[in-house]
Amino acid sequence: MSSTAKKQPMEVLGKEISTQLKGFNSLQVQNQNLASVDMFTKATLKHIKVDPKSNQRFTLLANLGIAYKSLFIRFGQLKAIDDAISHLGQALKDAPNHPNQHNHLSALSASYQLRFGLLGEAKDAELAVEQDKEAVRLAASNNDRYLQLAGLAHSQAKLAEGGQDVALQGDAINNLLQAIQLAPQRHPDLPEWHINLGDWYYSRSKISSTTKRADITEATNHWDQAVVLAKGQTKPSAQLSAALGYSYMARTKINSPTDQKNLIESAIRHFLVADKGAPHDHPDRSLWLTRLALAYQLGASILGHDKTIPNMRRAADFLQRAASSPSGRPLDRIRACEHLAKLDYSSDENAIQGKNFAYNTALRLATRLIWIGESIEQRYKGAGLIAGLARGAAAFAFSQNRPDQAIKWLEMGRGVILRQTTQLLPRFVKLPPNIDKSLSQCFRDVSQELGGFLMASTNGFATEEIKQKVHRLAEEYEELTKKIPEIHGISGLRPKTIEEYLTLVNSVGTVLIEINCHKSGSHVAAFLPGSAGFLSFELKPIGNLSVHDELEKARNDLNEALLNAGIRQRTNMSSGNNSKHRPMGIMQTKKGKAPPRPTIEDVLVMLWELVAKPILNCLNYQRRVLPDGTPDVNKMPLITWCGTGPLSFLPLHAAGNYKNQNSGSRDMVADYVVSSYTPTLHLWACMAALPLTSHQNISMLAIAQAKTDGYSDLLGTKEELKNIKNAVNRYNSKNQSSQQNITLTTLTNKQVMLNTVLDHLGKHYLVHIACHAIQDITDPLKSAIILQQKGQLTVGQLLKSPLQDYNRYIFLSACETSKGNLQSDEPFHLAAAMLFRFFGVIATRWAIHDEDAPLVAKVAYEMLFKNGWNDCGALAKALHIAVYKLWNSKNVGLSDYTRWVCFVHFGF
């Protein structure tokens, strides 16, 4: 485009660029096309800014949106597709009755679909369907209505992708069938549409038994038709070749064995054509290479024994190329790594190097899949895949006698969302003083603004504008981290090294134990004070099942036992009415369970034999119990447990052999060590690096709410508050001469308002909350403490509120505040969230009895005030004694596991 083009009328400029865009939409984009689009976008934006009321505004904005969509198709950059959506949306808003509106609605839908393919946010797929439905309605009498029908079919199929919505799949199939009937006979998209129909029929056959046989027949027919139509094209596109290759692969699963050899050879041939014809930096290249590799892998089993090793090696080579493709979508590259890690064809050095490459590459891509520019709810969708890879990687490294690498990989892939949250909290990120002041301030400003948006998000972002604002802030944040070399040494921004863990363990004096649970092997890593290295060893199975499977079974058994016991929320047993409880996540159990029913004791005994006992024996720990049976907490080591996978849900602190329950013969973890938990090693390390300031005169906040609208009464909170007041008064009376005292502030019932609670939280050293709580298992930001007038102190509000280093301990006397969510390796529960503000947290695994909380609070605070609160582990030791007193009390026995096992400590 010449420099004089800017002087032409904008409608002429629009027509000129539209012609060039036709070539630009192909895979083979030349540099001059890119330059043309760049000049067009700049000229268009300048004209719109100068003359916002231009008659050509709709056409200009729409063409600009289409140009950005084409840029994204070619290069896969998020900003390009965001800009496409913005400009197309603005064009449609400015001219709601434009005669070409249906085409641009289709373009907007396609843009939403493309962004859905990149980020995976379901809202984009839903918006795509909305635009296409309106486009079909507006194009009812148009000759090109088939294009709108095809667009609607593809958006519906995209929305149904990976789900069980048979009706939606059926709508997609019917709409594309209509589109094919209306389309010109030689339309270039027909081959690919038939391939899509074949894929959709085949997909539906796997979830719908009523149409299974007919769907398989239809799938085959449409794939055959696609092959015939594709032969009429002189040079099929790389995209069509890849689609044909995938269809041949799918047919190997439904055709007879005699046809499989030809089918897999055809699949490989078409994938190779796609690989040769696609630009090296095309965003779909990683996906196509992965499918080519899987075709070779499938061929290894179909083409005969003599082809096995060569084909598997080719598969490994193509998977490495797919994983290494810099322009590939993060999920596509990670899937390639996942396949490569599972590729077992030999035990030679090349295969081992392939696994190393796969795990290392996948975990380095973790933060691109679980991207900080998306809502936490959206990030959770990729967390399970990454955490599973991390546990597999760690198990592999342990098996290769590389425990250092195992810990590194494990922490790279676990708790990614927790780590990203620490990155945005000033408490955990201290910039070195030698950084340029303007750069430092820019980093703080961007972090604060990005964090504000992310903490406020629940079900995605409220508007498209906010979503794109967060995208740009996240991109700017990532660029800033690259500009500050020292930032890689800052506590919150990266996984820790083994040396750092050892230094911190020596500094705080606690034992740190991480247990990796994986089907291929479960291993322990123990960091001990005073040691130059750490211990690592494998846990051995005690039956036919692997350790991982035993623990998975134990988790299910525990959930079932709690359901059978009616344990869900904090219960007011004295009221005689257990129907109203705190509405927490409901645990699921399997149908058809066989007697005898699992018991909590069975789970605790299994945990003792399989996990706890081997660890305590390896560490040479002895029972530390006084003659009267009281745990000698001052001589006990303090262990911070960090479990992975199913162990994240299980109560290791209560493991024991309870067949003989008198103090002289019982064997239980609580007689050997004081237990604490951390969601991840990284969060523990970030907290351990913070300064622990000592205070003589402190303030305490106690919040108690006996009555809450819509929830059961918690009459025990009155006694709970009374016990706290008595403990404070006794401490103050005893320390009058030294002028050391505790100032107690109480908020009860109608005083427990959201703004009041937020205002007080940052001003107190100790905090006690006795209220109802709710936990959202899909979006942890919505987990909350229930306050007056239906107010909720959510995790998101807590993290956004002003933070002070003064906060030390918090006791969450509520239900299931550390229960965990659907993602066992992203344990972002209420207790974990409190660790962003407090050094130590008392929480609960499941429902507590209303009458138990006052006793636990009474003993815990008496012990804390007696022994002091400045030492590391002071709160954990206080809880240890309090729980002992509970199960040793008149109304509760050691075998009443539902009453005492639920209390846990997190942090320091």
Image: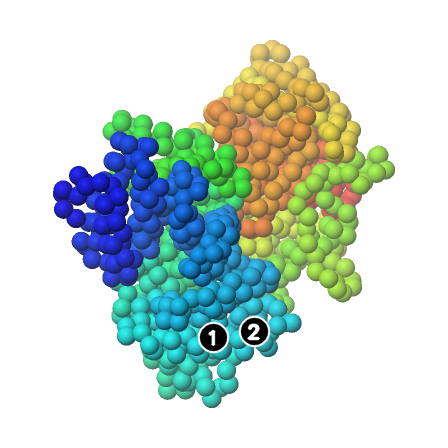
Name the residue at 53% across, 52% down.
644
Name the residue at 58% across, 25% down.
766
User: In the picture provided, is 442 more to the left or to the right than 850?
Assistant: left
- Under tag 1, what secondary structure? helix
Name the residue at 62% across, 30% down.
792
Question: Disc 2 marks which amino acid?
Answer: Asp
- Under tag 2, what secondary structure? helix
Q: Which residue is mark 2?
A: 215
Residue 71 screen position, x and y as percent: 30, 51
- Determine crowd level at label 2: few under 14, some 14-19, many 20+ residues with C-alpha closer than 10 A: many
Out of 713 and 877, give the one closest to the viewer. 713
Name the residue at 24% across, 62% down.
28
Residue 127 screen position, x and y as percent: 49, 48
Quarter occupied by residue 445:
top left
Residue 679 appears in the figure: no
In the image, is residue 874 above or below residue 153?
above
Question: Disc 1 marks which amino acid?
Answer: His
The residue at the far left in this view is 3
Tag 1 near tag 2, CB within 8 Å: no
In the image, is residue 282 above or below residue 306?
above
Residue 103 appears in the figure: yes
Q: Give the number of the mark in front: 1 or 2.
A: 1
Quarter occupied by residue 883:
top right
Residue 266 screen position, x and y as percent: 37, 80
Q: Which residue is mark 1?
A: 222
The residue at the far right in this view is 576
User: In the picture provided, is 68 more to the left or to the right than 634?
Assistant: left
Between discs 1 and 2, the one toward the N terminus: 2
